[in-house]
Image (spheres, rainbow, N blue to C red):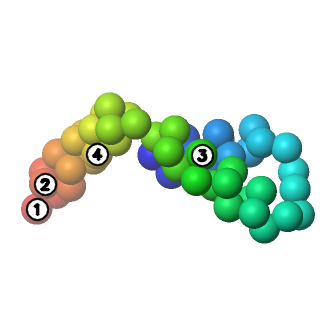
Amino acid sequence: CWGYAKHIYWQFPASTKEADLEQDVCEALDSVTLELMHKYVLPQAFTIMLQY
């Protein structure tokens, strides 16, 4: 999920204004849907459970 948000964030134009950067971060994080979270987290959780 974090990698997807970083990918989206890198697509925004570079800026030095803090307000622009904050808006870009919020938009990038908001782009991560619950569906993507479930898709990533469930296999990871299963793998971790198998290790114990």
Which SS class for mark 3? helix
Between the residue at mark 3 and the residue at mark 4, the CA separation in whole angstroms equals: 21 Å
Quarter of image, res 7: top right
- What residue does disc 1 label? 52
Q: Earlier in the sequence, mark 1 or mark 3?
A: 3
Question: Mark 3: which amino acid?
Answer: Glu
The reply to whether discs 2 and 3 touch (Cβ–Cβ < 8 Å) is no
> Position of 36 compared to 19: left or right?
left
Q: Nearer the viewer, mark 4 or mark 1?
A: 4
Asked if 42 appears above or below 51 in the picture, the reply is above
Question: Mark 4: which amino acid?
Answer: Val
The label on residue 43 is none
Q: Residue at x 22, y 41 (%)?
A: 42
Q: Residue at x 64, y 40 (%)?
A: 8
The reply to whether discs 4 and 1 touch (Cβ–Cβ < 8 Å) is no
Query: Along the line of sight, which residue is nearer the eye, 1 or 30?
Result: 30
Specify the farthest residue to the bottom: 18
Question: Mark 1: which amino acid?
Answer: Tyr
Q: Position of residue 33 (x, y in %)?
A: 40, 36
The label on residue 27 is 3
Which SS class for mark 2? helix
- What residue does disc 4 label? 41
